[in-house]
Amino acid sequence: MAQLHQRTLPDLLRNGLDVVFVGINPSLYSVAQGHYFARKANRFWPCFSRSRLSERVRRGLRVEMLEPHHDKYLPDYGFGFTDLVKRPTANVRDLRPGELAGGDAALIAKLERHRPRIVCFHGVTIYRAVAPALGLTVDHFALGAQAARIGTAHLFVVPNPSPANAHFTPAQQTEWYDRLAVAVDG
């Protein structure tokens, strides 16, 4: 297990992507599997697969449901992945104090360098951690499109797809990816 703490998931980024999904940090399980959102209980892949946002990917890969092993193909369809903190943990509560805020400068620099059209934060926790570095407050925060930008990238916040975020149903999670599709098309 100590060896997993030394590894992480590689960023799946390239210049000019339509959407970069930003997670809090990779789980030890995902790192062991070598794919983003690898745990079967995570709702990312089922909800993303049911959304309009993934139509082009599913058609291109000739699949109805996307799975974790498809992550490496998504940059070819305009989607990328990264994390605020690259250190994997068994649970987000295992992050050290200050790690979330400590990852903001590297994340912002990475996103400014790759210039995606939209940065999609998976959850309020990430957005709140990055907001101060962007000079933002989150007093009246709402999910969805944000007024701020990172470089030229628009910001969008969806619920975290983790099963620990069970107050959002899979249908609601899918609906947020559909809303993101509208932003991508707009």
Image (cartoon, rainbow, N blue to C red):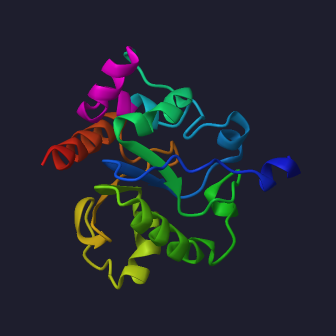
Residue at 28 percent of width and 31 percent of height: 51
Q: Position of residue 137 (x, y in %)?
A: 32, 82
Viewed as shown, does residue 172 lie left or right of 45? Answer: left
60 magenta-colored: yes
In the rendered image, the vertical position of residue 101 relative to residue 7, given as above or below? below
Viewed as shown, does residue 163 lie left or right of 90? Answer: left
Residue at 64 percent of width and 47 percent of height: 9
The residue lying toward the viewer, choosing from 69 and 152, is: 152
Is residue 165 in view?
no
Q: Position of residue 170 (x, y in %)?
A: 36, 35
Res. 108 image quadrant: bottom left
171 magenta-colored: no
Q: Main secondary structure of the magenta part?
A: helix
Q: Residue furthest right?
A: 2
Q: How many marks?
A: 0
Residue at 35 percent of width and 27 percent of height: 57
In the rendered image, the vertical position of residue 23 relative to residue 176, given as above or below? below
Is residue 76 in view?
yes
In the rendered image, the vertical position of residue 164 relative to residue 140, given as above or below? above
Res. 36 image quadrant: top right
Q: Residue furthest bottom?
A: 135
Q: Which residues are magenta?
A: 47-62
The residue lying toward the viewer, choosing from 176 and 183, is: 183
Q: Position of residue 74 (x, y in %)?
A: 43, 35
